[in-house]
Amino acid sequence: MNKNLFEVLKTRFPTDLSSPFLKGRQTISYQNLLDRTAQYANALGELGVMPGDRVAVQIDKSGEALMLYLGTIRAGAAYLPLNTAYTPNELSYFLGDAEPSLVVCDIEREDALRGVSGNAEVKTLGDEKEGSIITHVDAASTTFEEVVSDADSLAAILYTSGTTGQAKGAMLSHGNLSSNAKALAETWCFTSEDRLLHALPVYHTHGLFTATNTILYAGASMLFLRKFDIDKVMDVMPEATSMMGVPTFYSRLLQDERLSRDSVKHIRVFISGSAPLSPEVHSDFEARTGHAILERYGMTETGMNTSNPYDGARRAGTVGFPLPGVELRITDPETGGELKQGEIGSIEVRGPNVFEGYWRKPEKTLEDFRDDGFFITGDLGLIDDQGYVNIVGRDKDLIISGGFNVYPAEIEAAIDAIAEVGESAVIGAPHSDFGEGVLAVVACKSGENLTEQDVLNSLNDVLARFKQPKRVFFVEALPRNAMGKVQKKEMREQYAETFQSPKQ
Ligand code: AMP
């Protein structure tokens, strides 16, 4: 049987294909989706993309962007979405590593991308059905001979930065993505009647797979917003039945006076993830709207692993139970031995959702998997007395700012590259809007002097905006222990108040 994700999703489309799939600046019915993705799949073939080839994409969010995603899957190629904030400097690593045969970018990024895309063909796609790929797509047939894929064939590569600062491409298979779409649609009771308010980016697993694939599996529709703009969100809220968001969405909604029981009366579920949702936001939201936000936990490498129950207590500060088919255990980070209920340790998962490994990094893949197939997530947590998984921290010094992962080592390397800098440490501090804000502590070389603005200016063209520190502090020397390790825990305590005003 064909295990191609698109084929699996297609069997779930509504019988009435004129039903909407997406409503936004563009309206796309399921029939339009079938036709357009066939055109994309045909056009990719014409451009020389073969099954297994990578199609790297750095484009703004649009309905057409999703057609390209699904057309790529249909063609049996691997979709490689790239954060629109990445600079050409960052892209040159991803494209060099992934060696895509086709790069699709926004019209205005074409020149910069051509400089770093190696042998790949470069095409553009603007958000209003414009750009050089459109000529090929418009001319292509709306019928497509389906490509047969195995469950473990490569469907997508999503880059996730390592603690060493070197990005790793997580290889996700057709089986990974379809099993997670099924588990989520069923667990969260999505039906063809649902209209999901979608304000997430589509280059990240949350907006692309968790939201879009689940909606397709349910044959439901999305109210598609370019980004989280509070006025637009409040405008479309009355039409929606459900919303998925990062915690920041919920804290922003709470700051808006229009949020009331009445304004969300058609919503059946609010779902949160990608970073911890604070218990205060959970309870304030419930008090204001009557909705207990449903928090779930996942990551690029695994898709979703756990979820609070749809029916049953959604407990603040927890991420609920393993999804159907997912096994989760807590182990001693040193020995790998399984720990007892209530003990804090490394979260490990196994299941059809867990990725195939890191692209061209077999040694890293080996390191992160146990012999029995469990993946070491790098998160620390426990299973409480009622079986709910609690995440207590991150093994690595990962910072999550506005739902995006920021790895200190990469930022430190960029700061250390400034001539006057002796050493630097990057940490996250609680931020009322972003969850965590990135801040840097810098020690200049003796006799050298820099201002905060000097450091920020130097990073402007080197790092994506979300990775750039929001504050830079200067010290004589970084605090280190006897073993020479920088004491980040103490630094986090010291700088904990930095972003406590919402204006920062
Ligand atoms: P990403 O690969 O960008 O999706 O980031 C995955 C990481 O985000 C996980 O390994 C967790 O550290 C964190 N994460 C995701 N969901 C949650 C959650 N509900 N609570 C706490 N941390 C979360």
Image (spheres, grey):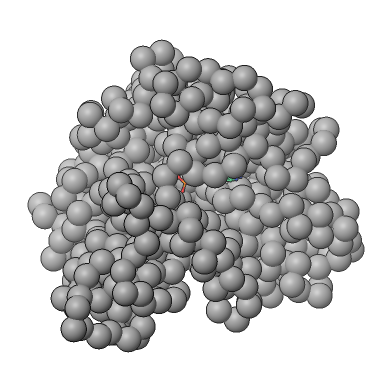
Examine the image and state in which quarter residue 390 appears.
top right
Examine the image and state in which quarter residue 456 appears.
bottom left
Q: Nearer the viewer, residue 464 or 499?
A: 499
Report whether 190 appears left or right of 408: right
Report whether 99 appears left or right of 366: left
Q: Nearer the viewer, residue 168 or 141?
A: 168
Expressed as whole percent of the image width and height from the top left, the position of residue 60 reads: 42, 64
Question: Residue farthest to the left?
Answer: 119
| Number of numbered callouts drawn | 0
Q: Is residue 348 above or below residue 24?
A: above
At x 21%, y 44%, the residue is: 98
Q: Quadrant of the C terminus?
A: bottom right
Expressed as whole percent of the image width and height from the top left, the position of residue 432 reads: 63, 68
Question: Residue farthest to the front?
Answer: 482
Residue 474 visible in the displayed image: yes
At x 20%, y 83%, the residue is: 448
Residue 27 visible in the displayed image: no
Expressed as whole percent of the image width and height from the top left, the position of residue 190 reads: 70, 37
Examine the image and state in which quarter residue 249 appears.
bottom right
Report whether 319 appears left or right of 467: right
Q: Nearer the viewer, residue 453 or 315?
A: 453
Expressed as whole percent of the image width and height from the top left, the position of residue 287 reads: 88, 58
At x 30%, y 41%, the residue is: 169
Q: Quadrant of the N terminus?
A: top left
Q: Nearer the viewer, residue 168 or 497?
A: 497
Q: Is residue 42 above or below residue 468?
A: above
At x 19%, y 46%, the residue is: 97
Report whether 116 appears left or right of 317: left
Q: Is residue 239 above or below residue 19?
A: below
